[in-house]
Amino acid sequence: MTACLAGCGGQAVPEAAQPVSPAKVFAAPKPAPIPVAAPVAVEPAPDDSASVASAEDESLNREVPVACSGSDGCFPDPGFTERLCRGKFPSVSLAMFAKTAPWKHLFVQAVSIEPINVLGGPRSESMMGFGEEVVVLRRRGPGSGKGVQISGPTDLDVLRWDGTCATIREELFVTYNQGVVTAPHIVWKYLDDSIQEGLRRNAAVDHAQAAERKSCRDSSPTKRTPECDRAMKKLTDTIVIAVRSGLAVPAPETTPEWRSALPTASR
């Protein structure tokens, strides 16, 4: 039995019986208990944390931007870019590349570029190559505030077709398509179900997806057989053509939760 702590109002009970010396034992007089005042009930102050948290939750946006922000070009809100590039949202990329979206598109003019994501999110396993199309999310350069300079006076945060981001020197892009548009593999199973259904309305995409499913039955997205790799490339190319041609797909369900950074940036 556990001994009662001092001041509990009763005599402590020993943990276990101890042998007593035959010599005479003198017990010290037990001090009188000190009266303890009863606790005074205090009414707690109003807790504003719940209302503050609620207000913060309400300020979070889960919708993909559809209008330009900022004064130095047509870019999505910086808060959206931050959260988008810290994760991977393949379905969001299709909405950003849609023909009706206002964002600026550029094309890689270098043979090979390593896709560095300075925001710490995942990066694609595929190198960026000649003819790849990207959507410009933000410009980083002199006067851009807290932007990170990694490769020169002006860098761009860009979105790739597979949903990953990269920060690349602006001079490595051109504004026009120099030939066949290329893109990193779009992994079908990572797309929202509603997006898949919308893409299948295009007969070419539906056919390419059926072929990809058959060819990649025994492969994983990261360990593909040559047959699967060719089928995934064919499916990606078909999706790119369909979306660039104006195929309407549903709004993505899996989106980043973001808060506008414009009020802070404007101060």
Image: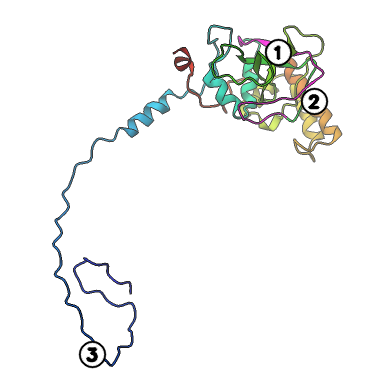
Amino acid type, residue under disc 3 in the picture: Lys
Name the image quarter holding the N terminus.
bottom left
Question: Are there few (<14), some (14-19), or many (20+) residues within 10 Å of tag 2?
Answer: some
- For label 3, the SS is loop
Q: Is residue 9 left or right of residue 263?
A: left
- For label 1, the SS is helix
x and y, in percent, of residue 126 in the image: 76, 27
x and y, in percent, of residue 80 in the image: 54, 21
Within the magenta stretch, is there residue 102?
yes
Residue 178 marker: none
Residue that appears at 15% across and 67% down:
33
The residue beneath circle 2 is: 233
Question: Relative to 90, does residue 243 appear above or below in the rendering?
Answer: above
Query: Residue 17: which quarter of the image?
Result: bottom left
Q: CA distance from mark 1 to mark 3?
A: 101 Å
The residue beneath circle 3 is: 24
Question: Are there few (<14), some (14-19), or many (20+) residues within 10 Å of tag 1?
Answer: some
Q: What is the span of residues highlighted in magenta in the rendered image?
A: 101-124
Q: How many marks?
A: 3
Residue 244 marker: 1
Question: Relative to 191, does residue 34 appear above or below in the rendering?
Answer: below
Residue that appears at 69% across and 19% down:
151
Circles 2 and 3: CB distance less than 8 Å?
A: no
Circles 2 and 1: CB distance less than 8 Å?
A: no
Residue that appears at 60% across and 21% down:
148
Chain-order first, disc 1 or disc 3: 3
Closer to us: 143 or 62: 143
Amino acid type, residue under disc 2 in the picture: Lys
- The answer to whether residue 110 is visible is yes
x and y, in percent, of residue 229 in the image: 82, 31
Question: Relative to 219, does residue 247 appear above or below in the rendering?
Answer: above
Residue that appears at 28% across and 35% down:
47
